[in-house]
Image (tube, rainbow, N blue to C red):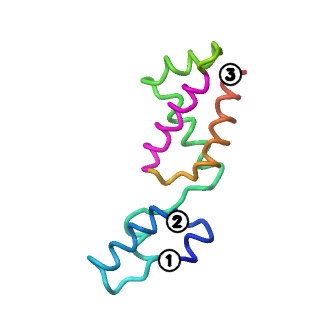
């Protein structure tokens, strides 16, 4: 479990969930199997993150935020945070936050040009 956190396969919050399952529900499975079964894996592949970011940013219900972003101004950071929250929700918290922000910046830059 520690190795999975150290190599970036799990976040600390995912590891806590795995640990809870290990001690309360499934005393015989190994951490890797529990994480796989429950879908607790960090998404760090840039191509996957870019696709996820594009799908969230281009959703029809987010069109007004995208238009506000394209207009620019002082409040762009709020719109970026809005998209970060939506993307994290879409990934069920599994997206690597730093790489996801990089992917979001690439997607927004591409759509803004």
Task: Residue at 60%, 27% (x, y): give it.
Answer: 77
Which portion, as a residue range, is magenta?
76-92
- Give the foreground label among 3 and 2: 2
User: Which sits earlier in the primary sequence, circle 2 or circle 1?
Assistant: 1
Find the distance from the CA under tag 2 to the CA under tag 1: 8 Å
Q: Which residue is mark 1?
A: 1
* The magenta stretch spans residue 85: yes
User: Which sits earlier in the primary sequence, circle 3 or circle 2?
Assistant: 2
Question: Residue 14 sits in which quadrant?
Answer: bottom left
Q: Are marks 2 and 1 in contact (CB under 8 Å)?
A: yes
Q: Position of residue 106 (x, y in %)?
A: 69, 36
Question: Residue 39 sits in which quadrant?
Answer: bottom left
Q: Is residue 78 left or right of residue 73?
A: left
Q: Position of residue 101 (x, y in %)?
A: 63, 41
Q: Which residue is mark 3?
A: 112
Q: Which residue is mark 2?
A: 10
């Amino acid at each position: 479990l520690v190795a999975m956190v150290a190599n970036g396969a799990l976040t600390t919050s995912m590891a806590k969930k795995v640990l809870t399952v290990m001690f309360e529900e499934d005393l015989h499975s190994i951490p890797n199997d529990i994480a796989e079964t429950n879908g607790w894996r960090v998404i760090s592949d840039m191509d996957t993150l870019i696709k996820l970011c594009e799908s969230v940013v281009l959703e029809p219900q987010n069109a007004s935020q995208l238009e506000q972003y394209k207009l620019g101004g002082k409040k762009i950071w709020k719109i970026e945070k809005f998209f970060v929250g939506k993307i994290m929700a879409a990934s069920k918290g599994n997206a690597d936050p730093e790489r996801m922000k990089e992917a979001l910046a690439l997607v927004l830059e591409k759509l803004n040009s």
